[in-house]
Image (cartoon, helix red, strand yellow):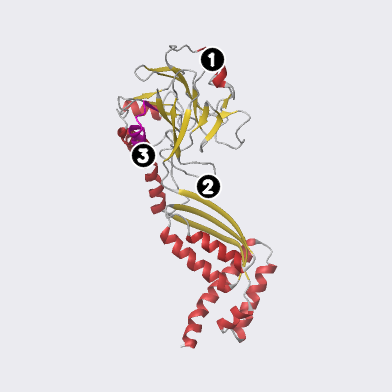
């Protein structure tokens, strides 16, 4: 019974400029580790082949070092690999693929499907019908030639393509490259391995997106997996099993704080995240000065515990309570300043001015806290 591993969208060479240098480097390294993990999985589960459905590389201009490291990471599986160019690494006349061959980086067990056609894995009983992209965007269905491709009747017909199944996926995905939703039927495919959608997605029982093996975006779309596919014989229904390969979990939270319990619930969620988390947090609403300090302390702890934590607080307003102001001992002139900053937040004409007033109020509260502590002693 043939068994193969389906993966896609490695996006090697991707950079993470929005993160600081340490976090960005860790996220880059996790992508190499994901390749090593999927190679180990293919060996452990005795897969006959690994099929990579496009976007191995994030760009044509990645460094030679990146190219070599990618192929080095595949060493954990000695069986055949078939790699397809996608929209980020299209099979141009001069491309990342031609450079990889020129520098001798491609191992003997890796076959590059740079042209439309059939790759016969004779020993494994799998005929791979490939539809490589030869430019970043196409407007015709490159899988259409599958219908007329001949393969030995004893071999599985497995399609390998990169693009958007029409009428199924959202319109804002990376590529416009169309794929007919009924291609498995018209081309008599036992399975169609797809890339471009970065999460696991079943189109029908024979057509799947594997998604990227390591998440790189804040989207809740089941990223971070590979698929192992078992097909008993030609014509049999595939058995598709997902395996987790992700190192990091990406979370994007959008929260509105209105009452103290909202902050309590947020801090509790924050405390219970897995350590290998990347969190993007955006807050709106109101906070007391005491609540703002609680939030600042909790974020400081989270930044040291998790891989990356970013928090946009520009939508928050500080609303000091009478107890907040009393605790600051902000009498006389300082009390007037606190009240003016409080009013400025609410009457500011734009978010920048409101943010400046809020930040000034938070800084003043921070400066007055030590004075309060000294008085208490």
**3D distance between C-alphas at marks 2 and 1:** 37 Å
Tag 2 secondary structure:
loop
Q: Nearer the viewer, residue 205 or 79?
A: 205
Tag 1 secondary structure:
helix
Tell me, yes or no, whether the two marked residues, 3 and 2, touch with CB atoms within 8 Å: no
Mark sitting earlier along the chain (1/3) = 3
Question: x, y percentage for residue 95?
Answer: 41, 28
Q: Which residues are magenta?
A: 39-50
Q: Which residue is mark 1?
A: 147
Residue 140 drawn above or below residue 65: above
Question: x, y percentage for residue 125?
Answer: 39, 18
**3D distance between C-alphas at marks 1 and 3:** 34 Å
Which corner quadrant holds the N terminus? top left
Give the class, few, some or many, for how many residues have Cα within 10 Å of label 3's Cα (few <14, many ≥20): many
Q: Is residue 336 inside the magenta stretch?
A: no
**Residue 58 seen in this snapshot:** no
Q: Which residue is mark 3?
A: 37
Q: Which residue is mark 2?
A: 218
Tag 3 secondary structure:
helix
Tell me, yes or no, whether the two marked residues, 1 and 3, touch with CB atoms within 8 Å: no
Rendering quarter of residue 204: top right
Mark 3 or mark 2: which is in front?
A: 3
**3D distance between C-alphas at marks 3 and 2:** 22 Å
Which labelled disc corresponds to residue 20?
Answer: none
């Amino acid at each position: 019974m043939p068994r193969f591993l389906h993966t896609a969208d490695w996006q090697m060479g991707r950079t993470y400029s929005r993160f600081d240098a340490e976090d960005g480097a860790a996220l880059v390294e996790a992508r190499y580790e994901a390749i090593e993990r999927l190679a180990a999985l293919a060996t452990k589960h005795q897969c006959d082949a690994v099929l990579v459905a496009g976007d191995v590389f994030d760009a044509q201009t990645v460094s030679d070092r990146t190219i070599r490291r990618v192929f080095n990471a595949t060493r954990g599986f000695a069986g055949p690999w078939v790699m397809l160019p996608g929209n980020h690494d299209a099979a141009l006349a001069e491309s990342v693929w031609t450079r990889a061959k020129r520098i001798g980086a491609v191992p003997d067990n890796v076959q590059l499907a740079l042209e439309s056609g059939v790759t016969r894995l004779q020993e494994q009983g799998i005929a791979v019908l490939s539809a490589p992209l030869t430019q970043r965007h196409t407007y015709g269905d490159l899988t259409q030639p599958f219908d007329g491709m001949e393969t030995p009747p004893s071999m599985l017909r497995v399609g390998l393509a990169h693009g958007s199944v029409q009428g199924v996926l959202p319109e804002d995905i990376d590529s416009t490259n169309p794929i007919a939703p009924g291609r498995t039927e018209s081309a008599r495919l036992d399975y169609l391995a797809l890339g471009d959608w970065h999460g696991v997605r079943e189109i029908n029982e024979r057509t799947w997106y594997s998604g990227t093996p390591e998440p790189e975006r804040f989207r809740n779309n089941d990223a971070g997996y590979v698929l192992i596919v078992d097909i008993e014989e030609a014509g049999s229904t595939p058995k598709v099993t997902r395996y987790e390969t992700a190192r990091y979990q990406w979370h994007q939270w959008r929260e509105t704080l209105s009452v103290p319990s909202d902050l309590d619930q947020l801090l509790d969620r924050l405390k219970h995240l897995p350590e290998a988390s990347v969190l993007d947090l955006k807050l709106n609403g109101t906070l007391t000065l005491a609540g703002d300090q609680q939030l600042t302390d909790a974020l400081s702890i989270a930044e040291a515990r998790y891989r990356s934590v970013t928090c946009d607080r520009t939508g928050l307003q500080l609303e000091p309570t009478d107890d907040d102001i009393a605790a600051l001992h902000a009498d006389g002139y300082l009390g007037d300043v606190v009240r003016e900053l409080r009013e400025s937040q609410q009457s500011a004409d734009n978010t920048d001015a409101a943010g400046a007033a809020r930040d000034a109020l938070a800084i003043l509260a921070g400066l007055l806290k030590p004075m309060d502590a000294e008085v208490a002693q």
